[in-house]
Image (spheres, coloured by chain):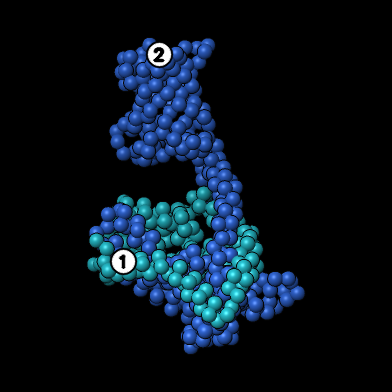
Chain colours: A cyan, B blue
Amino acid sequence: MESLFIVITKILSTAAIPMIVFAIVVVAAIRKVKVYEEFVEGAKDGFTTAVRIIPYLVAMLVAIGMFRASGAMDLLSQAVSPVTNAIGFPSELLPLAVVRNLSGSGSLGLMTDIMKTHGPDSFMGRLAGAMMGSHETTFYVLAVYFGAVNIRKTRHAALAGIFSDVVALIMSVILVRWLFP
Amino acid sequence: MLNYIWLGLIVIAIFVAVGRDVNEEATNRFRNNEDVTLHVAPDALTVAGPNHYTGTAYLTQEDIARFYGASEAKTVTGDTVLFPTDIVLSQSNPNAGTLTLSIPATAPSVLQDAAAADGDPTKIIGKASFDTSTFVTGASISFLPPTVHFRILAKVADEGILKIANTAVELAFGLIGVMALWLGIMKIAEAAGLVLLLSKIVKPIMVRIFPDVPPDHPAIGAMVMNMTANFLGLSNAATPLGLKAMEELNKLNPVAGTATNAMCMFLTINTTALTLVPATVIAIRLTLGSTNPTDIIMPTFLATFVSLILGIIFTRIIERFFPIRGSERTEAA
């Protein structure tokens, strides 16, 4: 069933981590680096970095959690539906488009739901898949990455992230329509 | 920017929650303090023990429309909804007791919401009155569910605030192990000069995208490793490497606490998530019986690629409209 391409990428993604670790350690050893000491020295910061992002994560996830629990997400989807209908974007996929930016697990659930309802090979199913794959949970990434270096003034980062997501969304619609007529 | 988004999310959430709750109160959606009449088919409720009956009760779509309103009746598909029912008779009165109504997936949404508001979305427990002698021939039961007030606000408090705060800590703690691993590996790679080597290879592209970062700075190496990990779908490695890159970028930051142009650009590239194979999506399509689950790769890749290019251009254009106000220099990073 699986094409050769998929088999190769599977092997690549399974072997990548061990091979990278192996290659770095061996090359470093050849270059006379004290690998064990250097590793421990670097790994020391793992805990502090992880703990440093907690306040940022709490702030971001709580705001998103409140927004979702209140049902505001559905209202927002309804509010923007005239605009999206105009560009030929099915309104059933709107919640997914909004949630994708906010929550990884939430959007995965929505995508699975859409594929179950409409079938994974339908226009809706493919579009949901393309939307899921071409987006990142922007606000989570912003919170974690800026949190790790205590950045509170994020300037244009959120706007740029949203812009890219909108472009990816529009391109997904165009491409799925074009490639699967 | 994030200030407004954050404030907006919270304010909108509270407004929507209060608005919906007030609307439910005004229309008395849950028919608080009113008895709903459940029907019991002949022999559908049988003795399960002393003072204990078990079986099924039902509501017709018409009953639901009459009691809860026509719009609630639209949320059921069939003519009747069957509820597994359990009754424990009261000690003093043989014709009254406590009724546990199990809520199936086919139940009207008003009952599902009421059950969820009461703590367990699968059942509603309330007081009931009836005549046990009629259970054999078919009967009616008056059922008084617990009252429901301001359920959405309660949901926001519970699911939206308290549980999520814990989730955030779990997520952060889950990162500690991989964080330590990749920071250790990065340190070895740095000491061996491999990060510098990688930086030199990608220099021609990176100096254009990140003009503020010196081409042989360790930040370049960390960013490239993060992008490679993302591209290969190795999200476990990508986050630690990305955070390492942010730390390196922060060393070039003249104003602590404020994002630099390079950081914003790096995040734009990161959030577009250019991936060779969207593995999760393919896996789910496969389990749902897609005939060719991998046909999603092409549109996903192209859509992401276009958004990456336009995102980079857009970030370069708008960065000048968000000037850095350099007053926080004294603040500790």
Q: Residue at x 40, y 25 (%)?
A: B85
Amino acid tagged 1: Val
- Residues tagged 1 and 2 counted as in contact (Cβ below 8 A): no
Which of these two is toward me, A42 or B23? A42
Residue B279's x, y, as percent? 37, 63
Q: Tell me what residue is drawn at x 40 percent, y 62 percent.
A: A132
Q: Is residue B305 visible?
A: yes
Is residue A146 shown above or below B260?
above
Q: CA distance from mark 1 to mark 2?
A: 66 Å
Q: Which mark is residue A7?
A: 1
Is A113 placed left or right of B228 in the picture?
left
Residue placed most toward the observer, B255 or B139: B255
- Residue at 50 percent across and 82 percent down: it is B198
Residue B28 position, x and y percent, is 50, 35
Packing grade of label 1 (10 A; few <14, some 14-19, many >=20) is few
Q: Quadrant of the C terminus of chain A?
A: bottom left
Residue A106 image point, x, y percent = 45, 54
Chain where mark 1 sits = A
Q: Which image quarter: residue B293?
A: bottom left
Q: Position of residue A13 (x, y in %)?
A: 40, 67
Residue type, numbered disc 2: Thr
Classify mark 2: helix, strand or loop.
helix
Residue picked out by circle 2: B132
